Image: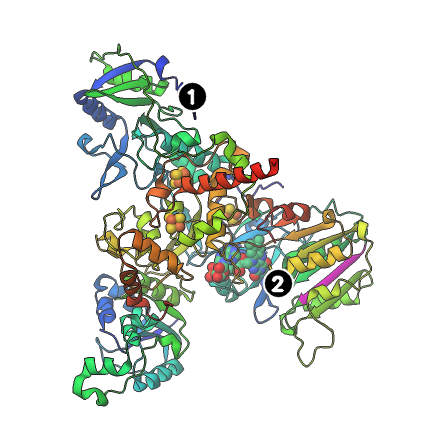
Amino acid sequence: MENTAIEKQDLYYPMMSEIVKVETLTNLEKRFEIALPDNQILGHLPGQFVEVSIFGYGEAPISICSSPTKMPNFDLTVRNAGKLTDKMHSMKEGSKIGIRGPYGNGFDVTKFEGKDILFVCGGIGLAPLKSLIDYTIAKRQKYGRIIILYGTKNPSEILFKEDIKMWQGSKEIEFHMTVDKPDEYWKGNTGVITTLIPPIDLDISNTIATVVGPPIMYKFVIMSLKGKRMPDENIYLSLERRMKCGVGKCGHCQINDTYVCQDGPVFHYPHAKQLEEAI
Amino acid sequence: MYYDSNTGLNKMKRYYFDQPTTDKFVEFLMTQAEVIAPQKKGDASYSYEVVTSGKDIVYDYPRTIQPLKKYFLPPRETLLSFDSKNNEFKKTDIALNNRIFFAIHSYEMQGIKRLDYSFTQGNPEFNYLQRRENSIFIGISFNPDKWHFTKSVGISIEEVERFSLYFEPVDNGFLVFEVDDTGKELISKFGNGLSLDASMDFEVREKEFKTKIKYHYNRLPQVFEHVYNSKVWSDIAQKCVGCGTCNLLCPTCYCFDVRDEVELEISKGKRERFWDGCMLNEFAEVAGGENFREKLSSRTRHRLHRKFKYITDHSGELHCVGCGRCTKYCPANISIVEIINNLIEEYSDHQKEQII
Amino acid sequence: MSKPKVAFFDFTSCEGCQLNKLNLENDLLSILELVDIVEFREAMDDKADEYDIAFIEGSISTPTCVERIHDIRRRTKILVALGACAVNGGINAMKNLYPADWVKEEVYGEDKYLFPSIPVQPVSALVKVDYEIRGCPMSTPEFLHVLKSLVLGRKPESFDYAVCVECKLKENECVLDKGMFCLGPISRAGCDAICPSNGQYCTGCRGLVSNINENGAVDMLKQHGFSEKEALNRMRLYCANDIEN
Ligand SMILES: Cc1cc2nc3c(=O)[nH]c(=O)nc-3n(C[C@H](O)[C@H](O)[C@H](O)COP(=O)(O)OP(=O)(O)OC[C@H]3O[C@@H](n4cnc5c(N)ncnc54)[C@H](O)[C@@H]3O)c2cc1C
Ligand code: SF4
Ligand code: SF4
Ligand code: FES
């Protein structure tokens, strides 16, 4: 991936960018549309992330949740979890934030061409996968079936409701979702995300599974996929670790000998399986 | 037995400096650049400090508290200063003055070599590399104390790699070896008008290390292939209090934390980085509350793998240089050599079982 | 943006923390630029009904304290526990290690029935504490950090690592190595290792780091020549409510 926006010298220096749109998704999450200075294009791959920087509040790694086909701006979906993210939630259109990146490896989209793609998204894990979902929808003819499985703790945590409506209405997309704890208005599936896997009919050898969710989810989702005899080679995960630099220097993101900010966050399962600390 | 002591010193041009000449030489160095050398710190410790008077230099120090990395990766460093009202920031200027690091031990130089690797791999880091510019290193030999084990990790006392000159104490002074062209230049500049004696014979006297790793260092990465699930890690965790001293004082550890702090004017502030360590509680904790290395056993395991396997697999060098700091300064008296020897023991028992 | 209204209240403590705050001299004027101090027992006599930030000093040890702390909680947006007593009971909590009657007798003698007393509790045992400033007396750098952060509207940082870290960053000579006692390896940083930097040992006044290896810590102190009893007693000095056995 070419990284023209950042010179070597500027590993830690952000590009001052602008929030051009803010949208409240849930009590905890907002989506921000970001414009880089001088209409620059971020040039990311689905699955990559940026370091968001707000002076006085620090930096945080956030996945890019829009498809590279959307240009020149890009979107971030941010959960209010602490210093920086809390401040970001108070920011309005026109506010400035710093951006470094894109960082990480991202999904190898060309390798997926011609394949069916199964998305398994738990909670805010939908945000990083949304970039790939949108990308495959934008290049619909290049991919086989698009199957999205989405699980949240409860109905109030559901993200991207408008997109979901579209996915549900589209013949091109198979969408299934579930919540762990329903409320009185919930009419859909209940139960953890793994309950969605057994009923779907998959052409196992021609399906790529991409999995993102909270740490404890991976083990169980992989078990279910293995239950369907999906080969390891067809499974991809995106993993979260603490990150400070995003450029392979601070050491925080290491899983055994692997830097998640460099050789991740997207992992091919056969590789992740070799890393004792991964799952 | 552990390494071959053919250090090349024998072939090098050398001079005899008595103490007055050495003092003069230090004065000369101070006219050339900022000179940094080991000095006394507190009651019984040493630290590298800028030399203001040659008398302050301690030539026979065992080791300093902080390693030399403090000059290239300062314990606390401003990455940028900002003005949040105007959304502006200023990069930090890193001075490019000449520095001479004087009376440095071989393992310390090797530690810098390891850091050079870590900061040039992948994304080269400007801050570190800029500070590394314009540095001259002058080595000195040392007498191993009960914590040094450099020989066991393949670093001889007389390893002169990356030094410009090397000092070997002899009666009433030093033999000064000309290691590279920079060293040669320094000597010729200094010696102009003086008649330096260059006729001394010299033989490397093998010095005994009290602390030894049981296997040849070449075999350590192989041992580390097999000990990930060893019991040794949880044994150590019984004693470890997780203070992080072993990380912070290690010459090859470089992990850091980044924090923003504002001034009382609020809109102005700095983004700073601090030394950090994988032995500390929050090092691998994320927003959801998950701590990916919650147990002290998994932290020690990670620390040791960083020294003997993870980076070694790529760089081909062990990233422990045998300085002994992590052991000497561990409040719980945990010895890295003991950990390794226990791992070796377990590994060799296991190998034997497989043969039977 | 109007200045946040700030109030300081004290409960059972030596009031050393407040004095410490007044010692901020150099910064005090800048602080007054940032915030409106509306209640501050030792310095002025104003009363305001609602606060943005209430700093609470001292632990809770009488029924009146209980009422008062609930009242303050209702009237403030942010509540900050200030100093060891408020954060974890501090030295005051030592009395929990002895029978209540004996303590009263010792302290008040004949008058013990005039002073209703309950087990010493940190503020957090009764009301929600948003942030903590540890230390006995409170650590001034941390006080400034919290104040600045709250004015910025940002969550303050608190460090869950040992005082050793700060000592090593400053390249202090280790006081354990000098044969002195020290709790630095298991005590919470944030004071910039002020005691070891001045040749004193760390008493752990900021409380212990979370999930400490208690047996390991006792063994460590034994290796340095201190008895198990002494080790535990010193650990209890500020952390009576945190130590298990
Ligand atoms: C590759 C990657 C992609 C991510 N994508 C998204 C995303 O799309 N949307 C989203 O809302 N969040 C995302 N996160 C998580 C997000 O980075 C954290 O929530 C954020 O760093 C918290 O920062 P803060 O300043 O708000 O919180 P802080 O006040 O710094 O800390 C709050 C808590 O977060 C933890 N934490 C601190 N720093 C980090 C860090 N750098 N990484 C992880 N946890 C940390 C701490 O343990 C602390 O308990 C992603 C994380 C990674 C590693
Ligand atoms: S210095 Fe010793 S006690 Fe401290 S973290 Fe390292 S091994 Fe554990
Ligand atoms: S691991 Fe210990 S002995 Fe090895 S280089 Fe680091 S501090 Fe020195
Ligand atoms: S985030 Fe710093 S090394 Fe990966």
Residue at the spot of label 1? B4
Residue at the spot of label 2? A124
C89 left or right, relative to B342: left
What residue span does the magenta drawing correspond to?
Answer: A145-151
**Residue A135 vs residue C224, the one in the foreground:** C224
Residue at 22% across, 78% down: C44
For residue A149: magenta? yes
B44 left or right, relative to C129: left
Residue B309 on image: x %, y %: 52, 38
**Residue B310 vs residue B189, the one in the foreground:** B310
Specify whether tag 1 is near ligand 3 (CB below 8 Å).
no
Residue B199 on image: x %, y %: 26, 9
Amino acid at dot 1? Asp
Does the CB distance between marks 2 and 1 fall below 8 Å? no
Disc nearest the viewer among 2 and 1: 1
Residue at 68% across, 54% down: A67
Whether residue C121 appears in this view of the structure is yes
Residue A125 on image: x %, y %: 63, 60
Residue at 44% across, 46% down: B255
To the question of a shared chain for discs 2 and 1, the answer is no
Q: CA distance from mark 2 to mark 1?
A: 57 Å
B139 left or right, relative to A165: left
Q: For the C terminus of chain C, which image quadrant? A: bottom left
Specify whether tag 2 is near ligand 1 (CB below 8 Å).
yes
Under tag 2, what secondary structure?
helix
For residue A204: magenta? no
Amino acid at dot 2? Ile
Instruction: Look at the picture and state if A6 lies above or below A192.
Output: above
Whether residue B133 appears in this view of the structure is no
Chain holding disc 1: B
Instruction: Bin the neighbour count of mark 2 within 10 Å (Cα to Cα): few under 14, some 14-19, many 20 and up.
Output: many
**Residue B156 vs residue A162, the one in the foreground:** B156
